[in-house]
Image (cartoon, rainbow, N blue to C red):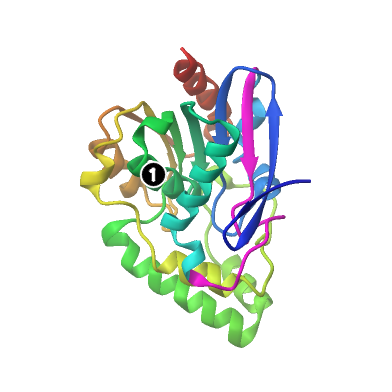
Amino acid sequence: MSTFAVPGADLALGLSDEGGHPVVQLHGLTSSRSRDRLLDLDLGRGLSGTRLLRYDARGHGRSTGRAEPDDYRWENLADDLLRLLDAYFPGERVHGVGPSMGTATLLHAAVREPDRFSGLTLLVPPTAWETRVAKADDYRAAASLIEQQGLEVFLEAGRLQPVPPATAGLPETQPDVDVSLLPSLFRGAGATDLPSPDAIAGIDVPVALLAWVDDPSHPLSTAEALLDILPSATLAVASTRADLETWPTVLAADVARSAG
């Protein structure tokens, strides 16, 4: 297993080097490279002829982490991403792809270093700005529930929630995170937000937004707001599993355009 050291963590990663354009793939909160594959969110599986870097965020999957909520704020995850790009693709413009927390991490990194990216494919953007307030409360409540009653009670509560139609039939998965770190992850997520709309408006590269319907944690309103804010963005919305299965071809087209 390859790892990369960042302050407070060792990030587990894999590089599929087939030459061609550099691509970095991220994942969502409590997920990982392997879990995203089960959830049909591993869009890089459809790529060929690229240099694809996939990694587990700190505290997730096979990466290590600390029980420090601030470590998991999106701004700090963007620090990790930019360090990785400096090490693996120095001086190159990279195409970034990732869902939810991965989308947020990419937006923070692109606001900070807009010339670092050739394009972005952003999946199921999370709650942001006005909708982030209630979600932050949910995350803090989840952290307390896990601490007080354990992981299984938290998981059982999650099973009672409806699933977006685009994910119907996917296998049930559990957080790919050590239970001792889960409360810190949730508290970190509850203390963070997307960059301001004015800052995001400065990301002047092609951006493909891929959203789905009926998911309060990833409301269509965030994707629609980003569509209005970003200078060069498109939006596709999945309402069925068949729609979701087209997303790898969207990424392949996005990367081809970035490499153009």
Q: Is residue 230 visible?
A: yes
Q: Residue at x 56, y 26 (%)?
A: 22
Magenta stretch secondary structure, dominant: loop
Q: Residue at x 47, y 72 (%)?
A: 187
Name the kind of residue labelled 1 in the image. Leu
Furthest residue toward bottom? 148
Of the pair 4 and 120, the residue shown nearer to us: 4
Estimate how packed mark 1 is, as few (under 14), some (14 to 19) or many (20 or more) residues with alpha carbons within 10 Å: many
Q: Which residue is drawn at 53% across and 64% down?
A: 161
Q: Can residue 101 be seen in this view?
A: no
111 left or right of 180? Answer: left
Q: In this view, does 77 lie above or below 116?
A: below
Which x, y percent locates residue 196?
A: 25, 51
Q: Does the magenta stretch include residue 50?
A: yes
Which x, y percent locates residue 202?
A: 25, 36
Which x, y percent locates residue 129?
A: 28, 58
Helix, strand or loop for disc 1: helix
Q: Give the range drawn in magenta.
A: 49-69
Furthest residue toward right? 1
153 left or right of 115? Answer: right
Residue linked to disc 1: 107
Which x, y percent locates residue 90?
A: 53, 31
Q: In this view, does 256 lie above or below 34?
A: above
Q: Is residue 116 magenta?
A: no
